[in-house]
Amino acid sequence: LDSKLAVAKTPGKFNFPEEMGAFYIKRMFQWNRDEMIFDRNKRKLSITDRKCCEHETVRLVFDTLNVNPVTLQAAAKRTLSIPIDAAFFAYVRPAVSYPVGGFLYLDKSVQPLAINWLTLDSQGFAMCFKQGICMSPEAAEFLRTDRRWMPITVDFLSAAGAKNYSFIGPNDTLG
């Protein structure tokens, strides 16, 4: 994850599509490591959620994208509430309760450590995205056939004309 880190002083300031703006990082302490199961081949994260309902255990299943290496140094990991022993990460697709998605952090054995959800609510540190780059039609088609395009789930982006997005990791190749 090589995005610029910044303390966003003015939450909600976006200039889409010229710039994406800031998405805040929210650490989830809700689940223990032993309650998370990650299937790398199926790109699925399964979580036992005991806090969801009083008398029953619910299994939450999230789709993820490819596993990528964490490229941040220890100081940046601490700043972003990324576990120090995180060696890999995978983007977690948005779901009803988590409409912006997030990042699953994995140890060197590719076992789940933690999840950081993205939010638009001011939370301190944020990932800031600058202007996008144009991609070839072949790259866009590759993302489609690999089921990596996701519908926009943030209202102001939809209102500005955005239709889909894809998270592309630092080691991903497109086609």
Image (cartoon, rainbow, N blue to C red):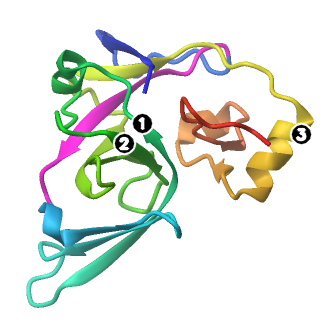
User: Which of the two marks, 1 or 3, is nearer to us in this view?
Assistant: 1
Which mark is first along the chain, 3 or 1? 1
Label 1 – label 2 distance at C-alpha = 4 Å
Q: Residue 61 appears in which quarter of the rendering?
A: bottom left
Q: Residue at x 22, y 35 (%)?
A: 82
Residue under circle 2? 88
Q: Secondary structure at mark 1?
A: strand
Q: Amino acid at mark 1?
A: Pro
- Main SS of the magenta part reads strand
Which mark is first along the chain, 2 or 1? 1
Of 66 and 132, the residue lying toward us: 66
Give the image location of residue 81, x and y in percent: 18, 32
> As drawn, is 124 to the left or to the right of 153?
left
Residue under circle 3? 138
Which mark is first along the chain, 3 or 2? 2
Q: Amino acid at mark 2?
A: Phe
Of 21 and 36, the residue lying toward us: 36
Task: Tell me how many marks there are.
Answer: 3
Q: Residue furthest bottom?
A: 55
> As drawn, is 145 to the left or to the right of 40?
right
Magenta stretch encompasses residue 64? no
Region rendered in magenta: 18-30
Q: Residue at x 79, y 57 (%)?
A: 145
Residue under circle 1? 69
Q: Residue at x 29, y 9 (%)?
A: 9
Label 1 – label 3 distance at C-alpha = 25 Å
Give the image location of residue 141, x and y in percent: 85, 47
Give the image location of residue 23, x and y in percent: 40, 28
The numbered dot on residue 168 is: none
Q: Secondary structure at mark 3?
A: helix
